[in-house]
Image (tube, helix red, strand yellow):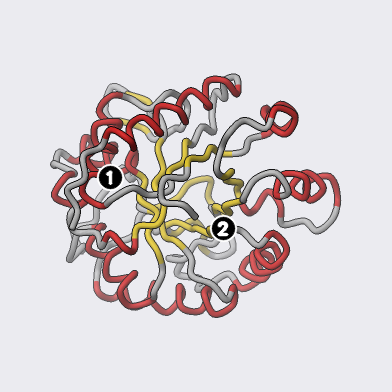
């Protein structure tokens, strides 16, 4: 995929309009689990969509960090979907979200320890062997930190990429949310990431609560996240970038305007990378 590719999340309120109007986007992202069922209207829709745009598959349910181990049934469904769609990117999260067969409606953080690193390396290796292609792992928005952590999340991701060959999906909004909630400067963390391993960037809005920022994907990208995005691509170089909007979904024109702002920010970023 072109490093300056711009996309948006493909969400139900926009299905008809987007496929009829065919706006100038470089790719669309769908949640993998929404299309696991073979046949039926969902697959028919995705068949039409992939003939119009390259598709990126973004998973939310593989729960790579679960104490239950790798969800092999889920992985088999993902394998079949990947084989059928032939996506340009496949991504998952640096998280866990299930235990004892119960799935939570959230992506939960892990401790960034050497023990967790070994577990994730083994599981990502297994996933990539099954899918027969590298996957991308996304940094998480979190509302707690573990005392046991032995490294930053970005160093953990960098080591995962080095050891498994996986890519990194850098969510700039998640990075900003965590930096505000836990009180640190996110910029030094970006420099810890190997540019060649960062293969996609996510941008989204968040909710400002009385106590913290909440990553709800329900508003426009704020000025501070745009600033951090411009800094990111200046340091790491241009990357395929995507606007996420999953709650209080507005008209398609609003997402397309955010995509245009992403193009502008990408073009305006002054390169600083080697």
Residue 195: give x, y in percent of width and height. Answer: 28, 59
The residue carrying mark 2 is 88
Q: Which residue is at the far right?
A: 40
Residue at (54, 80) in percent of width and height: 129
SS for callout 2:
loop
SS for callout 1:
helix
Mark 2: few, some, or many residues within 10 Å (few <14, many ≥20)?
some
Question: Left or right: where does residue 77 sit relative to residue 175?
Answer: right
Mark 1: few, some, or many residues within 10 Å (few <14, many ≥20)?
many
Question: Left or right: where does residue 87 sit relative to residue 165?
Answer: right
- Residue 17 vertical placement versus 133 (above, below): above
Can you tell which quarter of the image residue 171 is in?
A: top left
Q: Which circle marks residue 24 in the picture?
A: none
Residue 71: give x, y in percent of width and height. Answer: 58, 69
Q: Which circle marks residue 233 in the picture?
A: 1
* Lower sequence index among marks 1 and 2: 2
Using the numbered discs, state the Cα–Cα distance from disc 1 to disc 2 in whole angstroms.
21 Å
The one nearer the camera, 200 or 174, is 200
Residue at (44, 24) in percent of width and height: 219
């Amino acid at each position: 995929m072109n490093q300056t590719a711009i996309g948006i999340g493909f969400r139900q309120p926009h299905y008809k309009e987007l496929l009829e109007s065919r706006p100038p986007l470089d790719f669309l992202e769908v949640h993998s689990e929404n299309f696991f069922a073979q046949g039926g209207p969902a697959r028919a829709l995705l068949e039409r969509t992939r003939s119009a745009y390259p598709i990126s598959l973004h998973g939310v349910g593989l729960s790579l960090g679960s104490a239950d181990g790798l969800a092999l049934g889920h992985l088999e469904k993902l394998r079949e979907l990947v084989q059928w769609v032939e996506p340009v990117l496949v991504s998952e999260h640096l998280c866990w979200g299930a235990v004892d067969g119960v799935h939570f409606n959230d992506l939960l953080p892990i401790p960034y320890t050497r023990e967790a690193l070994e577990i994730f390396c083994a599981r990502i290796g297994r996933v990539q062997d099954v899918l027969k292609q590298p996957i991308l792992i996304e940094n998480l928005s979190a509302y707690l930190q573990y005392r046991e952590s032995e490294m930053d999340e970005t160093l953990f991701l960098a080591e995962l990429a080095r050891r498994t060959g996986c890519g990194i999906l850098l969510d700039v909004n998640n990075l900003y949310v965590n930096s505000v909630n836990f009180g640190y400067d996110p910029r030094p963390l970006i420099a810890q990431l190997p540019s060649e391993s960062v293969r996609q960037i996510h941008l989204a809005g968040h909710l400002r609560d009385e106590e913290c920022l909440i990553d709800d994907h329900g508003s426009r990208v704020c000025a501070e996240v745009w600033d951090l995005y411009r800094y990111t691509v200046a340091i790491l170089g241009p990357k395929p970038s995507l606007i996420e909007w999953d709650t209080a979904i507005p008209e398609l024109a609003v997402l397309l305007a955010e995509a245009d702002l992403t193009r502008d920010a990408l073009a305006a970023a002054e390169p600083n990378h080697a």
